[in-house]
Amino acid sequence: MKIRSRGIFWVLSFVLLFAFAMPAYGAEGIPRISVKQLNEILSNSELVVLDVRTERDWGNSDKKVVGAVRVNPDDINSWTGNYTKDQKIVLYCA
């Protein structure tokens, strides 16, 4: 279980680190999607949208994705085990 969590930790870390720094593809070929693309797939019941903004940023924002799960980006180990590698997961922080 620790190896799987550690792997998920690194994947999510790369996503978060490069989400805004990379063009169409981020680190290790992790794709980015536009708001329009996200809106097109939000009805997919297998999609998991994770809001990884800080608590302060999340609380001060009037813009939230309907159905997104708010997770603490500072405590990745508390939530990474809730998802499988087969799930399509979208992380957002803006």
Image (tube, rainbow, N blue to C red):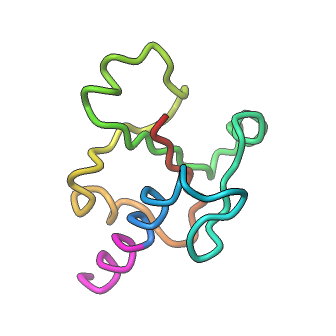
Q: For residue 81: magenta?
A: no
Q: Nearer the viewer, residue 23 or 56?
A: 23
Position of 44 relative to 83 (above/below): above
Q: Nearer the viewer, residue 61 or 6?
A: 61
Give the number of marks: 0
Q: Residue at x 27, y 82 (%)?
A: 1
Q: Residue at x 67, y 62 (%)?
A: 31
Q: Quadrant of residue 89?
A: bottom right
Q: Residue at x 70, y 48 (%)?
A: 33
Position of 6 relative to 40 (above/below): below
Q: Is residue 42 left or right of residue 17?
A: right
The segment highlighted magenta reads 1-10
Q: Quadrant of residue 52?
A: top left
Q: Nearer the viewer, residue 40 or 26?
A: 26
Q: Is residue 49 left or right of residue 60?
A: right
Q: Nearer the viewer, residue 75 or 85?
A: 75
Picture coordinates of residue 5 (x, y %)?
30, 75
Picture coordinates of residue 17 (x, y %)?
43, 59
Picture coordinates of residue 20 (x, y %)?
54, 49
Q: Residue at x 27, y 45 (%)?
A: 72
Is the magenta region chiefly helix, strand or loop?
A: helix
- Residue occupying the far bottom of the picture: 3
